[in-house]
């Protein structure tokens, strides 16, 4: 059994004070760092994703331009490549990260599986290559990128746990819907104290 951790989009723009800040995002950053510090052997591989959008265009309609964002498919400008908003939250310790994944260059991308490493490797290929069979998912936001990444991991044949105290959502209703979808697709929910 080879277990990996997915840290989804724990970036300044998705945490308090950011362009698209999620309540509880900063606590998720600190909690993930604590998890990794207390359980350094729990994960053979750690994947961390960042939304990484182009500057100067609407990234395939992902950024609201002429109308107010609907916070479903159009969003305020966020996570523009190279800006402070796109960086990992300062409370997230990234020493243990094996693979840094960037997604969303010029297009909407909610799932970590839509991203690549700087060398162009895909997440699906890396999981297969390294024999990963179990994935724990943490990060932001439960109702969007955590949801999409979890569903794709299940689709990839992984056993997936979502660590419920280390995720946070944009809105209560869409978070409840996302949790139901993930459960229906086969995800297991657990608090992070199950990690050994
Ligand atoms: Zn985005």
Image: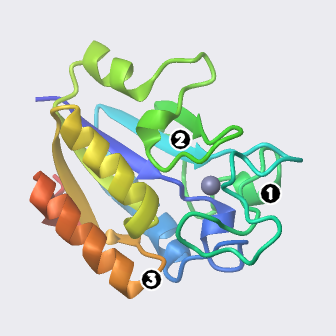
Quarter-of-image position of residue 12: bottom right
Relative image position of residue 20 (x, y in whole percent): 65, 72
Quarter-of-image position of residue 117: top right
Foreground mark, 2 or 3, reads 3
Real-space Cα separation, disc 3 to disc 1, in angstroms: 24 Å
Q: Is residue 17 above or below residue 101?
A: below
Question: Within 10 Å of the Cα at label 1, are there few (<14), some (14-19), or many (20+) other Cα atoms?
Answer: some
Q: Which residue is mark 2?
A: 95
Q: Are marks 2 and 3 in contact (CB under 8 Å)?
A: no
Residue at 71%, 39% in the rendered image: 106
Q: Is residue 105 left or right of residue 109?
A: right
Foreground mark, 3 or 1, reads 3
Label 2 or label 3, whichever comes before in sequence order: 2
Of the 4 image quadrants, the one containing the N terminus is top left
Q: Are marks 2 and 1 in contact (CB under 8 Å)?
A: no
Q: Secondary structure at mark 3?
A: loop
Label 3 or label 1, whichever comes before in sequence order: 1
Q: Is residue 45 left or right of residue 95?
A: left
Residue at 77%, 44% in the rendered image: 81
Label 2 or label 1, whichever comes before in sequence order: 1
Real-space Cα separation, disc 2 to disc 3, in angstroms: 31 Å
Q: Secondary structure at mark 1?
A: helix
Real-space Cα separation, disc 2 to disc 1, in angstroms: 19 Å
Q: Is residue 18 above or below residue 1?
A: below
Q: Which residue is mark 3?
A: 171
Q: Which residue is mark 1?
A: 84
């Amino acid at each position: 059994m080879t277990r990996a951790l997915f840290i989804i989009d724990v970036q300044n723009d998705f945490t308090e004070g950011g362009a698209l800040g999620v309540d509880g995002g900063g606590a998720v950053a600190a909690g993930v760092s604590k998890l990794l510090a207390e359980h350094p052997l729990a994960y053979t591989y750690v994947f961390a994703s960042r939304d990484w959008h182009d500057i100067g265009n609407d990234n395939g309609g992902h950024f609201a331009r002429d109308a107010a964002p609907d916070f479903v498919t159009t969003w305020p400008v966020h996570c523009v490549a190279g800006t402070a908003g796109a960086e990992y939250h300062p409370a997230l310790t990234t020493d243990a990260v094996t693979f840094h994944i960037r997604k969303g260059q010029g297009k909407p991308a909610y799932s970590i599986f839509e991203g690549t490493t700087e060398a162009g490797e895909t997440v699906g290929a890396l999981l297969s290559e390294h024999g990963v069979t179990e994935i724990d998912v943490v990060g932001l936001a439960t109702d969007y990128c955590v949801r999409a990444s979890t569903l794709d991991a299940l689709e990839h044949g992984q056993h997936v746990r979502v660590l419920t105290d280390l995720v946070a959502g944009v809105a209560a209703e869409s978070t409840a819907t996302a949790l139901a979808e993930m459960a229906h697709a086969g995800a297991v929910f657990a608090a992070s104290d199950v990690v050994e």
